[in-house]
Image (cartoon, grey):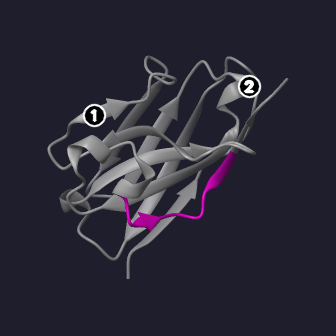
Amino acid sequence: QVQLVESGGGLVQPGGSLRLSCAGSGFTFSRIDMAWFRQAPGKEREGVASINTGGVLTYADSVKGRGTISKDNAKNTLYLQMDSLKPEDTAVYYCAAESGVWFSRRLQRNGYTYWGQGTQVTVSS
């Protein structure tokens, strides 16, 4: 079955960087559209960045210029590099996967069926 396992979260100071990883199994990595979402306490889960099988990247305005999504099909791993982190980036970060996401839903929660368990990112001094 499809499994997604995130790692790389932690406590980081404002202005710092983190690289999140999402290891996938149970599917052909190169044939799956994937994305990163995040959910802060008391807020809705929001799309952060997506990458489709054609290599098209999409970013939420909140992370443009600070976030970079990438994936290594040989390692079955999705990444999110986050730089210049701000306290408002504090959230649980989730990776998601779907076969053939509608382009209009690439940063929408209802575009994805498969989810990881999440990894906590806390930005604080």
Q: Residue 109: where, in percent of width, then height?
A: 44, 52
- State whether residue 119 is above or below residue 27: above
Instruction: Tell me which segment is drawn in magenta.
Output: 112-120
**For residue 87, which numbered disc appears in the image?**
2
**Quarter in which the C terminus is drawn:** top right
Q: What residue type is labelled 1?
A: Leu
Relative horizontal placement of residue 124, taking residue 104 as reference (left or right): right
Q: Residue 57 carries which label?
A: 1
The quarter of the displayed image where residue 59 is located: top left
In the foreground, 67 or 18: 67
What amino acid type should be assigned to the residue bearing mark 2?
Pro
Residue closest to the eye, 32 or 12: 32
Q: Residue at x 64, y 23 (%)?
A: 85
Give the structural element (helix, strand or loop) at label 2.
helix
Residue in view at x 36 percent, y 60 percent: 97
Residue name at image x 61 percent, y 45 percent: 44
Where residue 75 appears, as percent x and y from the top left, is: 33, 58
Residue 55 place in picture, x, y as percent? 19, 40
Characterize the local packing of mark 2: few (<14), some (14-19) or many (20 or more) Cα atoms within 10 angstroms.
some
